[in-house]
Amino acid sequence: MAEGPLTHLEGTWQGTGRGSYPTIEPFTYDETVTFTALPGKPVLAYTQRTTSAGGTPMHTEVGYLRPVGTQGVELVVAQPTGVTETHDGVAGYEPDGAWAVTFTSLQVGLTPNAKEVVSVRRALRVRGDTLTYELSMAAVGQPLTPHLWATLQRIKD
Amino acid sequence: MAEGPLTHLEGTWQGTGRGSYPTIEPFTYDETVTFTALPGKPVLAYTQRTTSAGGTPMHTEVGYLRPVGTQGVELVVAQPTGVTETHDGVAGYEPDGAWAVTFTSLQVGLTPNAKEVVSVRRALRVRGDTLTYELSMAAVGQPLTPHLWATLQRIKD
């Protein structure tokens, strides 16, 4: 088990999302996300993969979340497109009882052939067995712009 | 299947390694590494975990490698300690037929509570079903210093 507030995220989540960006056509996707406690450490391993409605693989990414104190969450992400992210987050409860964490992008690392990503903003919200997230991105000459929205259901603890 | 030279890495590898650093006691570890082709993309997903001889979890990390041209390899890594790495690498064959890739560290990303890592140098070498690697690190006030050495055998394609 993860410690503290990260326990809200543990499990396997599935659902659908939609994406848009000024430089591309809007799209939809099916998504599976896992948050799995690392043995012996207060850290969650994160995996994500999306497919088109027809089952064609789209995006995937991996990373880790670790708690800092009672409300802090640090996040690292690696993407096969040659992008890494580090984030500092603050978690808390909302009036309806949902647990939410909003991350501030610290650094974005890029390999030489990666597309230019300047910053990424990620926000997660868990209420019971429903996880919603939003991702905004400043990239390829665009300012920080909403990019992805998804709603997932916990299918496994 | 991955495309091009990355096929040398595909599979599951197991073996042992040893570590040292000016700031810590020398240690040894058992290690499992996987390089798995992403469906439909010329990219390998990388996972790594080490345990003590007694089975206690030690380090783990994840990332991706992607080929660039015939000899280039880009690498991204995320670590649960709050560290990300981006690397640019060059691969080629050595006189004995081994395939080797040496990575140059581009950026190291750190979350606020991560230990100070300045740069990481990684080199991998595959000869048949034997993978050896070396990792050097500039961190916690030390210059770039050899840190890890391991020899693994491919146990699964």
Image (cartoon, coloured by chain):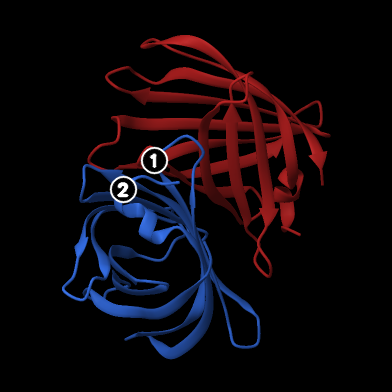
Chain colours: A blue, B red
Q: Earlier in the sequence, mark 1 or mark 2?
A: 2
> Looking at the image, which residue is at 42% across and 91% down?
A26
Q: Residues within 10 Å of mark 2 (few under 14, many from 20)?
A: few
Residue beneath disc 2? A4
Chain to which mark 2 belongs = A
Residue B138 location (% of width, % of height):
36, 24
Residue B62 appears in the figure: yes
What mark, if any, has residue A15 been given in the picture?
none
Q: Which of A144 and A32 is in front in this view?
A: A32
Q: Which amino acid does label 1 sit on?
A: Pro
User: Label 1 belongs to which residue?
Assistant: A42
Residue at 20% across, 65% down = A93
- The answer to which of A78 and A7 lies nearer the viewer is A7
Image quadrant in which you'd find residue A56: bottom right
The residues tagged by marks 1 and 2 sit, at their Cα atoms, a distance apart of: 8 Å
Question: How many numbered discs, if any?
Answer: 2
- Chain bearing tag 1 is A
User: Viewed as shown, does residue A146 lie left or right of B122?
Assistant: left
Relative vertical location of residue A118 with respect to residue B73 in this rendering, above or below: below
